[in-house]
Amino acid sequence: MVESASSRKDGKVVAIVAAAGAGHRLGADRPKAFVRVGDYTLLQHTLRRIDASTAVDEIIIMASFEMCATAQEQARELSLSTPMRVFPGGVLRSDSIYEGLKYLMRDDADETVGIVLIHDAARCFAPTELFTEVTEKVRALMAEDIAAGVIPVLPMVDTVKMVDSADNVLGTPDRTRLRRVQTPQGFDAKLLWTVHQAAKDEELTTTDDATLLEKYQLGVATVPGSEEAFKITTPTDLRLAQLLADEECEG
Ligand code: CTP
Ligand code: MG
């Protein structure tokens, strides 16, 4: 059973939703998180699924400065039961997460944050259970004093090649040892904030948060991911998203 925030002594669980990207590869007429699929925008699909997880006590949305008011409005429309706040993100995804963590880990915060879940708004069909499973795994590792993050992964379906700068094949990594990585990624909040600050000092940037832990020789554990947690990146992905949204309307 997932404990509620009030019954826990190890701090609340906060989901940071990264929604501050432009969505260049999607090429829509607005930032990707605000594109509508079926009845909801990508941001709203994401928020609905997180809100349904009893594991998450609070949601922080990172939106570009220009889209903060829209994000606030779209979240409000959903009448979420989970407390939510919107903040401006940064130029890179890692900057957006840094800004969210900076707010959460500020000295004068009235409640301690125990666990953070970092999630892409672009993975808007990631199922509610995934948030719960990742949180439970992080909590289990913390109980054993293991400093590690938790990421959802799936097996590779394609063979992957390593190429040189001229695109000629250098080799073929063993596919059975490769995984596709998704979000939500879960962390001991203090640990993630520490590595984000170190990375900022070193001007290190990464496309996911687990990579930061790897850079500092910290462990990263995995849980089984979900095909529905795929990232909407291209127009083809959006067509698949439309199918899922249609199914949701019918169901
Ligand atoms: N993101 C963010 N802040 C940024 C850049 C990205 O919060 N400065 C978020 C995006 O909104 C998205 C997630 O990180 O939900 C994953 O990034 P990606 O799929 O690359 O989204 P975009 O950066 O928006 O897309 P593109 O790279 O095609 O422009
Ligand atoms: Mg991007």
Image (cartoon, grey):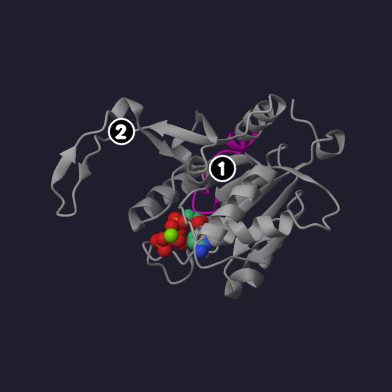
- State which region is magenta: 120-132
Q: Could one spot residue 179 in this view of the protein?
A: yes
Q: Residue at x 65, y 28 (%)?
A: 141
Image location (x, y in percent) of residue 166: 14, 54
Q: Which residue is mark 2?
A: 157
In terms of sequence position, does the residue under pointer 2 or pointer 1 come before the other?
A: 2
Amino acid type at circle 1 is Pro
Going by the numbered disc 2, the residue's amino acid type is Val
Q: Residue at x 72, y 60 (%)?
A: 85
Q: Quadrant of the N terminus?
A: top right
Vertically, is 165 above or below 6? below
Between residue 40 and residue 204, name the one nearer to us: 204
Q: Give the quadrant of residue 149.
A: top right
Mark number, residue 169? none
Labelled disc at residue 184: 1
125 is within the stretch colored magenta: yes
Structural crowding at the residue carrying mark 2, measured as other residues with C-alpha within 10 Å and reported as few (<14), some (14–19) or many (≥20): few
Give the Cα distance between marks 2 and 1: 21 Å
Picture coordinates of residue 23, whole percent (x, y): 43, 64
